[in-house]
Amino acid sequence: MEAFATSSARSRLILALDVSSADAALTMAGKLHAHVGLFKVGLELFSAAGPALVHGLAMRGDGVFLDLKFHDIPNTVRAAARQAAQMGVRMFNVHATGGRKMMEAAREGVEATGPGANRPLLLAVTVLTSLAAEDFREVGLAGEPTEAVTRLARLARRAGMDGVVASAREAAAIRAACGHGFVIVTPGIRPAAATAQDQARVATPSQAVQDGADFLVVGRPITSAADPVAAADAVVAEIDAALAKHGPDIPHRV
C-alpha cells in the first residue's frame, strides 16, 4: 500500500447513500458532492441500481465506498474482489469472519487488476455495529465485542488487508493492536444530538477521531435532515475541531 498522507476533515466523512433508487442516490450525491469525502453504496442501493450506479458516481468524480461485505468461499471472493476493483471504487470490504484464506483471496483479486495508486483500499468488517454483547451470546460467540474485534483486526492485518470496518468504540483498541498505517473506518457515527436508531455501538464524530478513526460513516443524521448540506457541514466541523484538538496526523490514503 502506498504511503499515507494527511487530509482535510471533509475527506474523512463518508456519506451512506442508504436510499432505494439510483435517482435518489444521484440527487443526494449531487447536493453533497462538495461537502463529504466519499459516498457509501451498500446492499439496498446496489441491489436496486447495480454496478451502473457505482460506475456513474465514479465517472462524475465521486469517491465510492462499496459496502457489500463479501463473505463466501475464497475463489468466489477473489473473483468478486477483482470485479469490485474494476468498478473504480476507492474502497470495498469483506467479512473478516470469512477467514484468512478468504481475505488473502480478496487481496489477490484486487492485485490482479494491477498495481498503482488507484488500487482501492481493501477493508475487513470485524463485528457489525448493530451487535451488542447479548447478541454475541445468542449466536454462541464467547467474550465481549471489543475482544472479538481486536482479534479479527489482527487477523485482517496478517491477511494483507489495508484496514478494518469497526465501531468507533473499538478504534483505540485496534490502533493499539495494529499500529498506524492500518485504516480504521467507523460506521455507527451519530452527532451528539442524534439518536442511535438500530445501531448498538455508536460514537460521536469527536469521540471517533479522538480514538483513532480514519474515516467516519454517517447516514441518516445527514440524509434525513431537513437540510442535509448543513447537517454534513456540522459533522465536518466536529471532525475538524477534534483534529485540531487531538492532532491532524491521523493517516490515511484516498
Image (cartoon, rainbow, N blue to C red):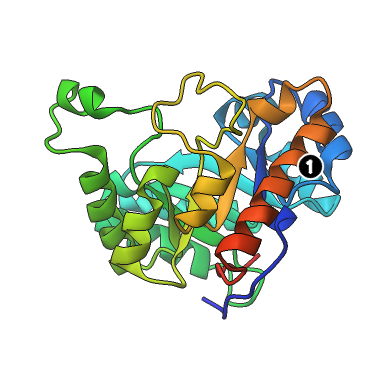
Give the camera-side residue of 140 and 244: 244
Judge the density around disc 1: few (<14), some (14-19), many (≥20) Cα neighbours within 10 Å. some
Q: Position of residue 67 (x, y in %)?
A: 54, 41
Comparing 198 with 236, the one in front is 236
**Residue displayed at 83% across by 35% down:** 229
- Quarter of the image for residue 235 reads top right
Name the kind of residue labelled 1 in the image: Asp
Residue at the image point whose x is 38% and y is 35% from the top: 128
The spot of residue 100 in percent (x, y) is: 26, 58
Residue sticking out furthest to the front:
245
Q: Is residue 103 visible?
A: no
Residue under numbered circle 1: 233
| Horizontal and vertical percent position of residue 111 | 50, 70
Give the residue displayed 17% in from the left and 20% down from the top.
138
Q: Is residue 191 visible?
A: yes
Decide if residue 136 is on the left or right side of residue 217.
left
Q: Looking at the rendering, in which quadrant would you find the C terminus? A: bottom right
**Residue found at x 56% / y 47%:** 206
